[in-house]
């Protein structure tokens, strides 16, 4: 079978008993970075030296079939550098291939940066979404954040410390300067830090530079109680900011519960002083 094993995200003491047992008996290990695995074995005092196979983002698709066949003959332990494989780490394509080939996939649960950040954030945990890393380029990042502006679940992101200030600034612009944000730095490590505030406040804080592994937890959007007149104003404000009318109407509808079609047509009338001869109802077929 294929066994996905969670490794510590910082504190070596978080290595589970099952992980230690698996590493002590494994004959083959596929790992994101074999050097990290060697260090982990030594740090845990494990004398076993299994065969190590490199499995990372750049070779996983090409190696998946080979590793699936290997897993038919022996247990294959799969590790990422930290946390659970497949969660913003290599492993998904391997698991996908294994499932298609009828090879059993199991897991040794353990540390998770996503769940740890969510738990300590103080933001709602009943419903959340993991969004991974934001795009590196400013325009693509802003576009992604605008798409998430009306997401009502708590959102968890990973981010590079070098891009943290820029991402928080873009969050303030796309999600609102007052949106509640929590930055979790170096979780479970000696210099662990959890910084809470508004998107604008944390963008200013991060401008001086931040180091370490970063998770960002963002509060979901609150459903707005708007009448149609307020909704139209909100749509027109988004349009003034560069968003297309149809997209703006859809965003405000999701946030307020007002009808997309009604918002679109009312905003168009307010903007141009006239209705479309043939309203574009195909854009919002469900009203």
Image (cartoon, rainbow, N blue to C red):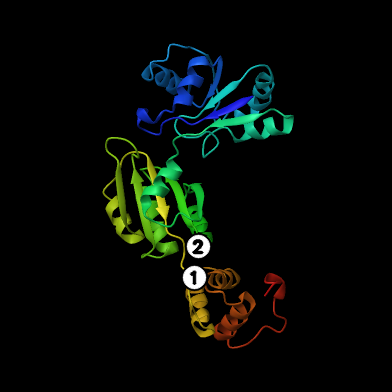
* Circle count: 2
The reply to whether residue 61 is in sight is no
Residue in the image at 31% along x and 48% along y = 194
Q: Position of residue 62 (x, y in %)?
A: 65, 27
Against 185, residue 79 (above or below) is above
Distance Cα–Cα, label 2 vs label 1: 8 Å
Query: Which residue occupies the foreground of this view, 4 or 229?
Result: 4
Query: Which residue occupies the foreground of this view, 236 or 95?
Result: 95
Residue in the image at 42% along x and 59% along y = 219
Question: On the rendered structure, is 143 left or right of 2?
Answer: left
Against 276, residue 25 (above or below) is above
Residue in the image at 59% along x and 21% along y = 76
Q: Position of residue 39 (x, y in %)?
A: 40, 19
Considering every residue shown, the one lying at the far front of the view is: 17
SS category of the residue bearing label 1: loop
Q: Position of residue 45 (x, y in %)?
A: 38, 15
Query: Which residue occupies the foreground of this view, 219 or 157?
Result: 219
Numbered tag placed on residue 152 in the rendering? 2
Label 1 Cα neighbours within 10 Å, binned few <14 / some 14-19 / many ≥20: some
Residue annotated with mark 1: 223
Against 59, residue 247 (above or below) is below
SS category of the residue bearing label 2: loop
The reply to whether residue 263 is in sight is yes
Residue in the image at 41% along x and 31% along y = 8
Name the quadrant of the C terminus. bottom right
Q: Are marks 2 and 1 in contact (CB under 8 Å)?
A: yes
Q: Position of residue 56 (x, y in %)?
A: 54, 29
Question: On the rendered structure, is 23 left or right of 177?
Answer: right
Query: Which residue occupies the foreground of this view, 191 or 159?
Result: 191
Label 2 Cα neighbours within 10 Å, binned few <14 / some 14-19 / many ≥20: some
Numbered tag placed on residue 28 in the rendering? none
């Amino acid at each position: 079978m294929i066994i996905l094993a969670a490794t510590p995200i910082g504190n070596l003491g978080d290595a589970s008993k099952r992980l230690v047992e698996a590493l002590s008996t494994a004959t083959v290990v596929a790992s994101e970075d074999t050097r990290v695995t060697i260090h982990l074995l030594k740090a845990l005092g494990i004398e076993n030296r299994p065969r190590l196979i490199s499995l990372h983002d750049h070779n996983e698709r090409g190696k998946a079939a080979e590793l699936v066949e290997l897993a038919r003959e022996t247990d294959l332990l799969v590790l990422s550098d930290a946390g659970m494989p497949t969660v913003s780490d290599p492993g998904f394509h391997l698991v996908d291939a294994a499932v298609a080939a009828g090879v059993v996939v199991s897991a040794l649960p353990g540390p998770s940066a996503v769940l740890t950040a969510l738990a300590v954030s103080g933001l709602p945990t009943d419903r959340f979404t993991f969004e991974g890393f934001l795009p590196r380029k400013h325009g693509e990042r802003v576009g992604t954040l605008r798409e998430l502006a009306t997401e009502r679940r708590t959102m968890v992101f990973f981010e590079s410390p070098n891009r943290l200030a820029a991402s928080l600034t873009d969050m303030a612009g796309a999600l609102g300067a007052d949106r509640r944000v929590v930055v979790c730095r170096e979780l479970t490590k000696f210099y662990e830090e959890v910084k809470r505030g508004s998107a604008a406040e944390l963008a200013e804080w991060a401008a001086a530079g931040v180091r370490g592994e970063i998770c960002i937890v963002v509060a979901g959007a609150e459903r707005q109680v708007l009448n149609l007149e307020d909704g139209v104003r909100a749509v027109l404000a988004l349009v003034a900011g560069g968003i297309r009318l149809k997209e703006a109407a859809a965003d405000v509808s999701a946030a307020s519960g007002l009808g997309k079609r009604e918002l679109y047509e009312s905003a168009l009338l307010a903007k141009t002083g006239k209705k479309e001869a043939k309203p574009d109802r195909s854009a919002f077929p469900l009203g």
